[in-house]
């Protein structure tokens, strides 16, 4: 198991740095905050390993998250190899062990000459290289291309649009509810329900290999919607009896009256459609910034209004 080296402040971390660069026979995990010099120590360690001949440059694997960081890592490694080689050459004739000097110099020269053979890149590029070496075992086309950060979202949007168009003839429940919400969308929102569904699909892609089963909690939507509609209609009826239209409570209950009107209009032309009812209540609930100005917040005032009305 690799040893774990915490990286303290630079003033008292020299022992850790010396171990990273000098203890080449053991595997290490370095934990440190950003900007503390992890990349520098990584480069120094790779140079030391190559210099001592413990491995060859084509067997070096160094991965990072972005192409920019990978390019910078390779550049720094080239600079440090060149610096170490120049330093060795300047010590010609001074070295205590000529054999070690020549051995290390040959190792550095080979490393510089074959640096492009080192696997220094992003995690994605490293995985893609392995897949291209083993396409039969991976059961993929060896001519595949890895998507760029710009191309991947574009292709996903195309696939999502094709999928949504194919589902329009017989939409599944979740998609049908999304379409119903579009009709009652609050246009002050940053995303429509359809956009939110598209974003949710993009996020789920990151979890496509998650092995745990999807947990669905039972929920009686029709019973809950009936209760909510009944409460909204009753509260709207009670608030409409208010004789002082400038009253703060009357103003706070405006979203409830709007929701009740929308429910009545929808049910005048057809029987209760629970997709529409859900869309109406969810759309109205986003109005206002204070909890008391949403239908759920206003429903808490029902008991007070009942007492006043009676």
Image: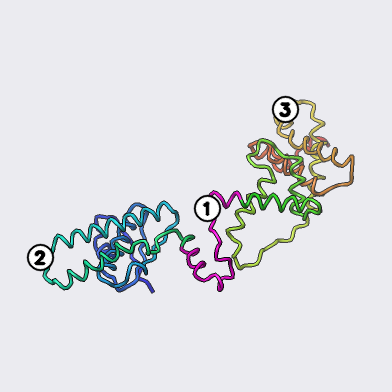
Front position in the image: 144 or 23: 144
Q: Residues within 10 Å of mark 1 (few under 14, many from 20)?
A: few
Instruction: Please name the residue that numbered disc 3 is placed on.
Output: 247
Tag of residue 148: 1
Instruction: Please name the residue that numbered disc 2 is placed on.
Output: 94
Q: Earlier in the sequence, mark 1 or mark 3?
A: 1
**In the rendering, at what x and y percent does residue 186 appear?**
70, 38
Viewer-side label of 1, 3: 1
Tag of residue 230: none
Q: Residue at x 20, y 58 (%)?
A: 86
Front position in the image: 106 or 209: 106
Position of the C terminus, as image quadrant, is: top right
The residue range painted magenta reads: 126-154
Q: Residues within 10 Å of mark 3 (few under 14, many from 20)?
A: few
Distance in Å between CA atoms under marks 1 and 2: 51 Å
Distance in Å between CA atoms under marks 1 and 3: 58 Å
Give the SS element for disc 1: loop
């Amino acid at each position: 198991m690799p040893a774990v080296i915490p990286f303290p402040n630079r003033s008292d971390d020299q022992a850790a740095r010396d171990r990273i660069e000098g203890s080449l026979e053991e595997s290490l995990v370095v934990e440190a905050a950003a900007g503390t010099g992890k990349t520098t120590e990584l480069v120094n360690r790779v140079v030391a390993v190559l210099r001592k001949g413990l491995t060859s440059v084509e067997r070096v694997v160094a991965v990072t998250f972005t192409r920019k960081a990978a390019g910078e890592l390779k550049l720094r490694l080239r600079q440090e190899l060149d610096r170490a080689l120049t330093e060795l050459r300047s010590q010609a004739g001074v070295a205590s062990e000529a054999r070690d000097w020549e051995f290390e110099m040959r190792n550095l020269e080979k490393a510089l000459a074959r640096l492009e053979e080192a696997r220094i890149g992003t995690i994605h590029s490293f995985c893609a290289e392995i897949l291209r070496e083993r396409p039969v075992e991976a059961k993929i086309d060896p001519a595949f291309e890895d998507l760029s950060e710009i191309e991947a979202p574009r292709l996903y949007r195309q696939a999502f649009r094709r999928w949504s168009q194919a589902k329009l003839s017989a939409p599944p429940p979740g998609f049908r509810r999304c379409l119903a919400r579009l009709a009652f969308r609050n246009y002050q929102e940053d995303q429509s329900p359809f956009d939110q569904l598209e974003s949710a699909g993009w996020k789920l892609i990151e979890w496509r290999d998650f092995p745990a089963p999807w947990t669905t909690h039972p929920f009686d939507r029709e019973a809950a919607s009936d209760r909510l509609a009944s409460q909204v209609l009753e509260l709207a009826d009670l608030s409409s009896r208010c004789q002082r239209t400038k009253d703060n409570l009357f103003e706070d209950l405006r979203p409830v009256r709007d929701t009740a009107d929308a429910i009545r209009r929808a049910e005048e032309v057809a029987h209760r459609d629970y997709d529409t009812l859900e869309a109406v209540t969810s759309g109205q609930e986003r109005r206002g910034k204070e909890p008391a100005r949403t239908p759920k917040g206003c429903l808490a005032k029902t008991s007070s209004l009942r007492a006043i009305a009676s």
